[in-house]
Image (cartoon, helix red, strand yellow):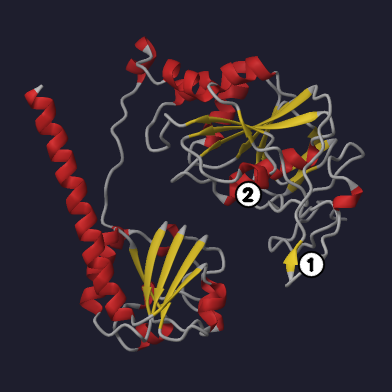
Amino acid sequence: MNTIKRIDPRRPFIITPAGLKRITLGEEGSADASAAQWSAQGHGTAAAKPRRAVQDPKHVMLVVAHAERSALDDHARQTIAAAALLADGQTLVVLLAFGELKDDVAELGVDKLIELAGFDRRAFAPERELQALQACAAALAPKHVFVPDNATGDGDLGRRYAAAAGASVATHVVEIDGKHVGAYAQAGRAFATRVLPDVILLAQNSVEAKLPFVGAGECLAGVGERLSAELIRPAGDAAQLYRDLGLEEINAAQVALEEADFIVSAGNGVSDIGAFERLAGAFGAAIGASRVAVDNGHFTRDKQVGATGKTVEASVYIAFGISGAVQHLQGIKDCRHVIAVNLDGSAPIAKRANLTVVGDAQATIAALIEQVEAARGQTSSSRNAAKLEGVAA
């Protein structure tokens, strides 16, 4: 008899009164029962979420994440939600953010924010990041440390910290509640559980990021600045162990659509393909297309976005002249920000878009090329002026 616990990879879910997707709260759950249901008021707007009550705080749940372009990705938001849902009435949720952060952290469930604006995710500085995390952990003595288990820095940092601190750790966690964590084992053939460890590296889509409450969202002023000033300077012998060679720039057109972070996509409303490709080059964006544009021979089949093409997860997806068939919308369902440019403001894609520009695609493309090139020209002039001033000095 097969006793291996199976988790549906499609992860169907219902938002429960506790705001959960794949997580259950124990008796020490933090959300009040009164915060369970939200009734619509006025013109269909949701009631304001209550603030999670914390009285006489004695414990800390510390969440560690890197910001990208001053924002946190969905994985980091889910990790914060896990900590917030497990925090009781005497536990603060503290976020240690590497990089500048402009998100509304209160909405994410954060009570206190430590922002290390001087750290750049594009720079490789593992020792300094570890020192910053160790300094925060020493000052806050967190009950648990939560880290997104990804391949872009957070997962590595969480493992480094656990090893340096001699802390108990669970990686690739797909199930969590107030008493245990669970993860697949033996190449997915088994499911293992254990009591909550000191360091929890959470897998993506294990927790629903939407919460029925908000946090205090207070910034610990001065802490981030002090740590950044102390740790960003050269680290002596440790800095000689490796060299940061920087990011290797490649042509965005060579990036697979599934891996692209910025995509511009053309539909039947784009007639000047050359101008569209120039815009993609100016933006440094990958090129996508609707099925109609591919069928018309304007783009190769590997550029097709949709249920019968590629499913993409870009941070920014700009659709020019795409009406938004069901199949295309299926292909962009996981994109973070969708911008639609279309003459028809009531086109189906407008319902999915975060921003809709009602206008001619060709005119918009021409205007964007002009604006981007002008902005880049100003940036280059400023850099050259700065270099000349440095030489003169």
Q: Gap between marks 2 and 1, in whole Å?
A: 33 Å
Residue at (33%, 80%) from the top-left corner?
Answer: 361
Chain-order first, disc 2 or disc 1: 1
Residue 243 as seen in the image, left or right of residue 151: left
| Total numbered labels | 2
Residue placed under numbered mark 2 in the picture: 204
Q: Picture coordinates of residue 75 (x, y %)?
A: 60, 48
For label 1, count other residues whose C-alpha is less than 10 Å away and answer few (under 14), some (14-19) or many (20+): few
Q: Is residue 192 visible to the viewer in this orientation of the structure? A: no
Q: Badge 2: how crowded within 10 Å, few (<14), some, or many (20+)?
A: some
Q: Residue furthest left?
A: 392
Residue 189 appears in the figure: yes
Of residue 218 and residue 342, the one placed in the foreground of this image is 218
Task: Tell me: 358 left or right of 277.
Answer: right
**Quarter location, residue 228:** top left
The kind of residue tagged 2 is: Gln
138 or 381, nearer to the observer: 381
Judged from the image, the secondary structure of the residue bearing numbered disc 2 is loop
For the C terminus, the quadrant is top left
x, y (%) of residue 227? 49, 19
Spot occupied by residue 130 in the image (x, y as percentages of width and height): 52, 22
Q: Report the residue at 46% width, 35% height from top.
A: 99
Q: Quadrant of residue 283?
A: bottom left
Quarter of the image with the N terminus is: bottom right
Left or right position of 99 against 212 = left
Residue at which label 1 appears: 41
Residue furthest top as drawn? 237
Residue 284 in percent (x, y) is at 29, 58
**Mark 2 against mark 1, which lies toward the viewer?**
1
Of residue 374 and residue 122, the one placed in the foreground of this image is 374
Q: Quick check: 34 left or right of 331?
A: right
Q: Does dot 1 land on a helix, a strand or a loop? A: strand
